[in-house]
Image (cartoon, grey):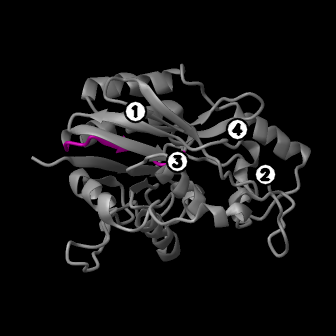
Amino acid sequence: MGFFLKIALLQMTSCGTDQEANKRKGEEFCRRAAGMGADIALFPEMWNIGYTAYDPRVWEQDYAPLDIDANERKMRREWQARAITQDNDFVVHFKDLAKELNMAVALTYLEKWHEAPRNTVSIIDRYGEIVLTYAKVHTLDFSLEAACTPGDDFYVCSLDTARGEVKIGAMICIDREFPESARILMLKGAEIVLTPNSCKLEDNRIGQFRARAYENMVGVAMANYAAPQLNGHSVAFDAVAFDECGHSLDTRIVEAGEEEGIYMAVFDMERIRAYRQDEVWGNAYRKPRCYGLLTSHNVREPFIRKDARR
């Protein structure tokens, strides 16, 4: 029998900042996913508070930066106070649930962290242990996440599923729009990249996500919020882009509509591994000696932004 990894994309609307209600709804969807045979349940971004903004003007101005006044500073502090640690009941509850269901859970939350919280995903294995915690590196410094601490690295873990072991990496939302994110995960050994999301998914963003899978020969899976909170379209793409005869394949495994639901992405891991052994993308023919400028901190016009953090 082959090794078919099943990832449940939990496309939901949140209960806003009601963390207890989000916990109950998340549990309900996880139980349904386990009943469908999922190996991993993937939440949308910052599930514990439903990616609720501290100030509606953040969204009304189409990501335009705001002047920080006393009232906004107060709202930011109140928003940041909703952050939780890994020993919080919200996280512990899903650790216990993962163990009960014998299913890994990629849980997202606003994580309490030193001076400012982080936008975090923790991968909980089927034994109820956290095996990877990743904080979003490419925070939206022009908007809401200027109130967050950016992550400082990308991580890959070995996840023991009931069907076999798989190398899992994680990135969050806009991380997928920077090719370096998925590239580093591939270089660290990722076979599958999980991507919690909270933004409208349209052709260009979905096309970028497809490209991350193609150019790195990794499977990618993304869970987004359902309408009317956002527009759904949770999606997964295969690593395998050509068949044995060289014919191009449609790599889209699943793409949701806008409504709530659990959308199952099934990855043929044996096929992915065989493809990665022979094809030309990934790390086989890269020329790192020519890429030095990629790590430069210099920014020139027209890309200078006063609110950008390096």
Residue 213: image tag: none
Viewer-proximal residue among 302 and 66: 302
In the structure shown, which secondary structural element does the residue marked by tag 2 occupy? Answer: loop
| Alpha-carbon span between mark 4 and mark 2 | 24 Å
In the structure shown, which secondary structural element does the residue marked by tag 4 occupy? Answer: helix
Q: Which residues are magenta?
A: 36-45
Residue marked by disc 4: 79
User: Residue placed at 85% from the left, 74% from the top?
Assistant: 301
Whole-percent x and y of residue 181?
57, 55
Whole-percent x and y of residue 134?
55, 39
| Alpha-carbon span between mark 3 and mark 1 | 17 Å
User: Residue placed at 67% from the left, 41% from the top?
Assistant: 152
Question: Which image quadrant for residue 284?
Answer: bottom left
- Along the polypeptide, which appears first: circle 2 or circle 3? 3
Is label 3 or label 1 in front? 3
| Alpha-carbon span between mark 1 and mark 4 | 21 Å
| Alpha-carbon span between mark 1 and mark 2 | 38 Å
- Labels 1 and 2 touching (C-beta < 8 A): no
- Along the polypeptide, which appears first: circle 4 or circle 2? 4
Question: Which image quadrant for residue 77?
Answer: top right
State left or right for residue 91 relative to residue 236.
right
